[in-house]
Image (cartoon, rainbow, N blue to C red):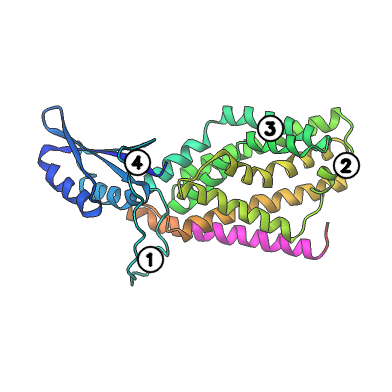
Amino acid sequence: MANRLLEVVVSKENEQEACDIIRKHIEDKILTSFVGEDLVSIRLVIHSAESGDVMKELETTFGSFESFRMLVFPLEASVPRIEEPEEEKEEETKEEDAPRFKILGVSIDELYADVTEAVGTVRNSAIMVILASIVAAVGLARNNVAVIIGAMVIAPFLGPNVAVSLGTVLGDFKLAIKAAKQLSITLVLGVAVSILIGMLFSIDHTVHEIASRTHVDMADIALALSSGVVGAFAFTSAALSSLIGVMVAVALLPPLAVFGMLLGSAHFSASLGALILFIVNIVCVNLAGVVTFRVFGVKPKVWWKEESARTGTRNAMILWGTLLAVLCLIILLGYI
């Protein structure tokens, strides 16, 4: 939902200042109530597009106070209905490091919470990727598109990929490394399951759904880049859904499963094409994720992380961009 219920807890002496900050950004009614003897709870319904500025100023002003808390809840409905805020023309800024665009729909805190939640746990992701690989292998072997789509719905690839990009842009390398490790584990498991299936069953590498993923062209690069942009944009616009996860999985799971199946069935030449397609897709998804977050002005909330975030983002873009250029050259030279 686009609306949020925001609850701010401050000390009694800071109540008026907090209310003034809120009213400076929105005109909705504010509800206050006492929490204990010296604390006040301020509640308001706010559109997600307006929440970022309010939360940032409140945290900047009261973040050092031990009593300060800020809670954000999704809101299913409000009576009477809240009108959508009108878009205002943004004033031009002369600051060199100002973001080109404001984040659409969510605050940095909500974005971070949504992405970290989407990463999940290693155990759950491992179970899901094993099941997804089995379903994908069956769909590929039977040339059944519906079953392949079902596998992509199951595949837990959206969260870790977006978390790697977000952690890089925010300078939160702990999140990026955690997500990268989890992604690596799930990918290895996916390959292992696919290889086992290829060894146990007869695989016809000429089946359309398999053969089509043993060749790479520029259209595949465009698809993977679009998937990465959609995955990152979904979190910044509060439009996250399981269908968007399919967009990322479509770039990663089928070629990964095809590679493992063909490798296990000793079709080595064809498996190389599937491997290159997978590498192209993983590079494009991560490059697009970093660029998307950067374009929408996602950056650390604290100044001392900004330099490391800029360095990490620049290095990541150089790395992914260089790999993509090399892969494009390989494709154009007809290596596969």
Mark 1 / mark 2, whichever is N-terminal: 1
Give the x, y percent position of residue 85: 34, 53
From the image, which quarter does the C terminus lie in? bottom right
Q: Amino acid at mark 2?
A: His
State yes or no: discs 3 and 4 in contact (Cβ < 8 Å).
no
Give the x, y percent position of residue 26: 25, 51
Residue, disc 1 = 97
Q: CA distance from mark 4 to mark 2?
A: 51 Å
The disc at residue 45 is none
Q: Amino acid at mark 4?
A: Arg
Residue in the image at 74% along x and 34% along y: 147
Residue in the image at 87% along x and 42% along y: 207
Residue, disc 4 = 4
Q: What are the residue bounds of the magenta stretch?
A: 313-333
Which of discs 3 and 1 lies nearer the camera? The answer is 3
The disc at residue 132 is 3
